[in-house]
Amino acid sequence: MILLNGNKWGTGALINTTADNYHPYLLTAHHLPNKSGYDAVANNSPFIPQLMFYWHYESPTCPNAFPAIRTTVGAKLVANNSISDFALFDLSGYNSDPRMRNDVTPYFLGWDFTEYSGTGGVCIHHPQGDIKKIATYTTTPRSTAELDDFEIWHESFWRVVWEPTTHNGVTKHGVTEKYSSGSPLINSNRKVIGQLRGGYASCDLKNSPDWYGKLQYTLGRYSVIIRH
């Protein structure tokens, strides 16, 4: 979970490089820095010291058993794209690197920026700033423009509708909410294919769609960053 100036802000995910060197790059949404009012270009500094990251913010049980707070502070913005709502932060600084904490075991997700979306998958996120939650889908994401069901001229987003999942005889219907923005969309091959822009899904509108900026659109432009 990501915080800015101590306030809940959004969700992010560590992604690995093709060199498999576990450099701490964090994927999230472009609109989050803009929403914060921080403009890295205007400030002539890509480093944002006000950012804080909660690690292992999760529970093995439901209802929630809240974990110990493990944090790192600060991040450097290394790439962003407003069209696909993509932002990539470098957390390799002294106080910002999760690998430097003995009580954090970072997990680096793989990713796929081909046009293949897979059929079904999950989103791992922090709805309303809560501890880690999961939402599932079993269909093939539709390629569309932002927040649009039909217009495909731009095709920079994946459209997803969440579906209920039954586990141990209990059926739950996970959906995104505020502060889920920036969370990874993980396909049936367990690869990240996008990050959450937003949408209409909520606890009251469980069958409404969300849109994820496509890595296929973005990383064709910035893939050199995570190929070192």
Image (cartoon, helix red, strand yellow):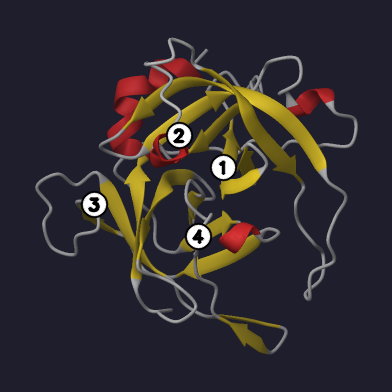
What is the total number of numbered labels drawn onto the structure image?
4
Q: Helix, strand, or loop for circle 4?
A: loop
**Residue drawn at point x = 49 percent, y = 78 percent:** 203
**Residue drawn at point x = 83 percent, y = 46 percent:** 69
**Which badge, 2 or 4, is on the more N-terminal residue?**
2
Distance of label 3 from label 4 (alpha carbons) = 18 Å
Q: Amino acid at mark 3?
A: Glu
- CB under 8 Å between callouts 1 and 2? no
Give the mark toward the camera: 1 or 4.
Answer: 4
Q: Position of residue 127 (x, y in %)?
A: 57, 62
**Which badge, 3 or 4, is on the more N-terminal residue?**
3
Distance of label 3 from label 2 (alpha carbons) = 19 Å
Give the mark toward the camera: 3 or 2.
Answer: 2
Q: Helix, strand, or loop for circle 3?
A: loop
Identify the residue under disc 1.
Answer: 12
In the depicted structure, whether residue 101 falls above or below residue 1: above
Q: Horizontal placement of 75 versus 144: left or right?
A: right
Identify the residue under disc 4.
Answer: 178
**Residue drawn at point x = 65 percent, y = 19 percent:** 21
Badge 3, how many Cα within 10 Å: few under 14, some, many 20+?
many
Give the mark toward the camera: 1 or 2.
Answer: 2
Q: Position of residue 118 (x, y in %)?
A: 39, 55
